[in-house]
Image (cartoon, rainbow, N blue to C red):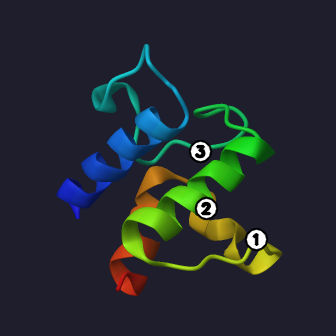
Amino acid sequence: MEALIEEIKQHLIDALNLEDMTTADIDADAPLFGDGLGLDSIDALEIILLVERNYGIKIDNTAATRPVFKSVRSLAEYVAKNRK
């Protein structure tokens, strides 16, 4: 799981142009949106594309999938359970 978390952190850095950050700067349990990493709704769409492209998982942008985007760890757990 830790390797997947690091991989997702790197994907986030690359996809969201977080050039001044390293994977060590991202707390796996911190919120992705709001006070944590401070991402917004446009970033959420980028994350959905990243997951679909890299892991073959289709994510519907609905309230039911909102908990998946709570943190890097919750995203990694979802990917681990659902990837093709």
Report x, y in % for residue 63: 81, 74
Write down the residue under mark 2: 48
Query: What is the three-letter code of the residue carrying label 2?
Result: Ile
Instruction: Indicate the secondary structure of the residue bearing disc 3.
Output: loop
Q: Earlier in the sequence, mark 1 or mark 2?
A: 2
Query: What is the three-letter code of the residue carrying label 1?
Result: Asn
Q: CA distance from mark 1 to mark 2?
A: 8 Å
Label 3: few (<14), some or many (≥20) within 10 Å? some
Q: Work out whether 46 lies above or below 19.
A: below
Write down the residue under mark 1: 61
Instruction: Indicate the secondary structure of the residue bearing disc 2.
Output: helix
Q: Earlier in the sequence, mark 3 or mark 2?
A: 3
**x 74%, y 80%: residue:** 64
Write down the residue under mark 3: 31
Figure quadrant of the N terminus = bottom left
Instruction: Indicate the secondary structure of the residue bearing disc 1.
Output: loop
Report x, y in % for residue 48: 61, 61
Name the quadrant containing residue 45.
bottom right
- The count of marks equals 3
Q: Earlier in the sequence, mark 3 or mark 1?
A: 3
Query: What is the three-letter code of the residue carrying label 3?
Result: Pro
Q: Nearer the viewer, mark 3 or mark 2?
A: 2
**x 67%, y 31%: residue:** 38
Number of the label disc, if any, that sits on residue 9: none
Figure quadrant of the C terminus = bottom left
**x 46%, y 42%: residue:** 12
Q: Work out whether 66 lies above or below 30.
A: below
Q: Are marks 1 and 2 in contact (CB under 8 Å)?
A: yes
Q: Work out whether 75 lies above or below 8.
A: below
